[in-house]
Image: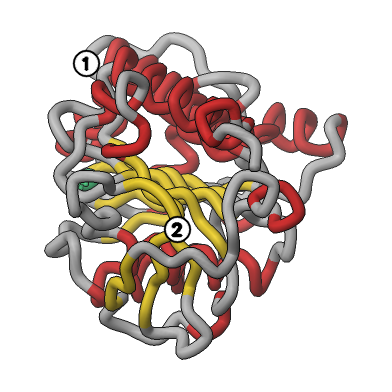
Amino acid sequence: MKDMMNAPFVVEMRKLTANMYRLGWDERNGGNISYMLDEDTVWEYLKPDEVIRTIPLGFDASAVAGKVFIVTGTGKYFKNVDDDPETNLGIVRIAADGVNAELLWGYRDGGKFTSEFPAHLMSHMARLSVDPANRVIIHCHPTHVLAMNYVHELEEKSFTHTLWEMCTECIVVFPDGVGVLPWMLCGTNSIGEATAEKMKEFRLVVWGMHGIYGAGKTIDEAFGLIETVEKAAQIYMLTAHLPRINTIRDEEMVELAEFFGVNYRRDFLNL
Ligand code: 2HA
Ligand code: ZN
């Protein structure tokens, strides 16, 4: 067995959580990550029949039964992952019955996965139904996205359109736009179901006055989506109270989307 501390997915999680903490998007225990692992790689580090504990999921995740995820722990701080991955992270396999998770590594202090794991798993299932290569779900509280939630209409078309206007790269990076949910109680199956419904259409979903979800095939894709939205939201917050002299026009966004060959939400433009 190889040493788990050197596993590429553990190294990636340590770097990602530390990065996000320093960006200020994951205060205290804010934010959570789940990453579906490549099974050929994971069994180089773990024995498939050595289950530490079984933890109930609270809903039916049969669509991902047998899949293995590395997941941040409930109540754990991103700040602390790098120093002690084995306490702050866990590796779980969704049991054959679809309603339990089998702990294979981590949560060393008796902990369990994030309270948002239902929302994550439901989002994984939704993304996999439209993109079989999806692997990563990231949730966090990016400062400017959150600020924008208080001063901008929480509506998908206008929210996406405003973000697209803020940086030239936006329509190319997230041509599929940003889904928006109203404020909802977090940690519940209901917010999970609502998020998953949006995830069939969007890789990014804003949780009104709470934060954002990003999905991707890789950590770079999911993180890069959130990072780009956060940058655009920052530009918005730096300029929203000032007279607007210039803007990226809708015709220019079309030019960008066509030049880079991306399939964008035409209905989110005002042409
Ligand atoms: O895990 O961010 O949404 C803490 C949260 C809950
Ligand atoms: Zn949150």
Residue 134, given in percent of the width and then of the height, sits at 65, 56
Query: What is the x, y in percent for residue 52?
Result: 36, 63
Q: Which residue lies at the image location 61% right of the left edge and 40% below the top edge?
A: 174
Q: Secondary structure at mark 1?
A: loop
Q: Which residue appears at 37% of the width and 19% of the height? A: 18
Q: Residues within 10 Å of mark 1 (few under 14, many from 20)?
A: few
Circle nearer the N terminus (2, 1): 2
Indicate the position of residue 9 as horizontal and vertical percent values: 58, 36
Which residue appears at 57% of the width and 32% of the height?
3
In the drawing, does residue 133 fall left or right of residue 146? Answer: right
Q: Amino acid at mark 2?
A: Leu
The disc placed on residue 241 is 1
Q: Which mark is residue 130?
A: none
Tag 2, which secondary structure? strand
As rendered, which of 132 and 184 lies closer to the eye? 132
Q: Estimate the x, y position of residue 212 in percent, counting from the top left.
A: 34, 44
Ligand 2's quadrant: top left
Kind of residue at disc 1: His
